[in-house]
Amino acid sequence: MITSLRSKIQLVFTVTLILLGVLFFFSIKYDHAVVEERTQAQERTISHYLYNYYLRYGEIDKAYLASQNVSLVTDKNTVIQIERYFKEKGKYKRYAVDTYHLKRFILINNDHFNLILENKNKAKFPIKRVIIFSSIFLLILALYLWIIKSLRPLSKLKTQIQTFSKGNLDINCKSDKKDEIAEVANEFDYAVTMIRELLQSRQLFLRAIMHELKTPIAKGRLVSEMLPDKKSKSRMHSIFERLNLLIDEFAKIEKITSKNFELTIKPYKMSDLVETSVDLLMIDHPQRLIEIKIIEDFHNKVDFELFTLTLKNLLDNSIKYSSDKQVQVIIEQHGLQIINKGEALTEPLENYFKPFHASKKGLGLGLYIVKSILDIHKMTLHYHYEEGKNIFTVL
């Protein structure tokens, strides 16, 4: 099925030109039929006139033949050849007309005389009709090229939109023309400009907040260490840790969603990625909490920094929500499973991908970051619950 606008235009003009060619062909054929009918009528008239003239005067009126642009064939060899030709075609009769060596000959054979005449009247080349049809053809072709040229900005706009969809906001699709395509291009350019300014202001705002909060948080943590009351000290320490966690999570979200970075995709062993992710957790004696089981190690093409951040968040969530604080990681057959004991998820997994999903032990940003990074790598996260265990699979 033809869906593109360019293809539809090409189809319309192709059908139009084909119909024009068919019309030209049949018009030429019609003209030829009219000329042929007129020529045959003229030849019959000449035959009757010569017969009647011969009966009255006993001779052939050569002056009349000359006036009709018809000549009498007198060369005997030529006459013999033409008669043989008519006999071979079964046309050697009292009256016959045929073409021999691209010349039109009239055979008149009656009781009084036997003549072969050459009709020198030729059908005129339909110069006017050719000029008219050629002009129409060129006009249609010019219209087609004009319309196709008008659609070129649409192809350019499509390329710009594709570039924009990949996260590149540094595009310019302004047009100084006055047609509808130019209006769409200008509106899109305005929208891109507004989005660019909005993203820049958002990034500036987030970075300013993170920068301004880092210093008082660091000072607050130092002051909290000096508190004599252990309970108050622990509570203040927890508050500042949570604030610091909030800033770190915002920084990660800003980096992922801004799409102003380039992925460095290289093949890495999955076991190496998991070990690096465990190191990012910054926990003491991780082997006591995390069991890594390698059934079949494999290489995975990923961005090292982002993908290890994904696994780190999955491991962190698994430890937090595990009933025994134990997590098992299984590497096998081009997939990775992260398993912990605990209660099943109360909602579909897709709900946990939303930012700031309600959570008692975190900010609800972990799985949002995981989903964003996996989408960038065109990978998926699956979940199922089996025999009291939560099983997350990265494919």
Image (tube, grey):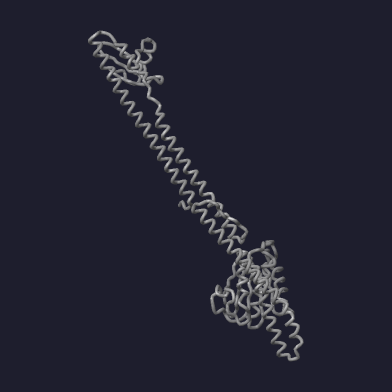
Residue 24 x/y as whole percent: 39, 35
Q: Nearer the viewer, residue 193 or 165?
A: 193
Q: Residue at x 47, y 43 (%)?
A: 143
Q: Quadrant of residue 370?
A: bottom right
Q: Is residue 373 visible?
A: no
Q: Residue furthest left?
A: 56
The quadrant where residue 22 appears: top left
Asked if residue 86 is positioned above or below residue 234 in the image, the reply reads above
Label count reads 0
Instruction: Give left or right: position of 40 versus 237.
Output: left
358 or 9: nearer the viewer: 9
Residue at the spot 59% in from the left edge and 67% down from the top edge: 380
Residue 175 seen anywhere in this rendered image of the structure: yes
Residue displayed at 59% across by 59% down? 164
Q: Residue 314, position in %: x, y?
A: 64, 74
Residue 372 in picture, x, y percent from top left: 61, 68
Image side of residue 19 versus residue 176, left or right: left
Question: Which quadrant of the figure contains the C terminus?
Answer: bottom right
User: Farthest residue toward the bottom?
Assistant: 229
Q: Position of residue 281 (x, y in %)?
A: 70, 76
Would residue 169 appear left or right of 143 to someone viewing this image? right
Above or below residue 159? Residue 328 is: below
Q: Quadrant of residue 351?
A: bottom right
Task: From the viewer's perspective, tell me whether residue 382 is left or right of residue 101.
Answer: right
Q: Residue furthest top?
A: 58
Name the residue furthest right. Answer: 226
Pick the residue in front: 134 or 381: 134
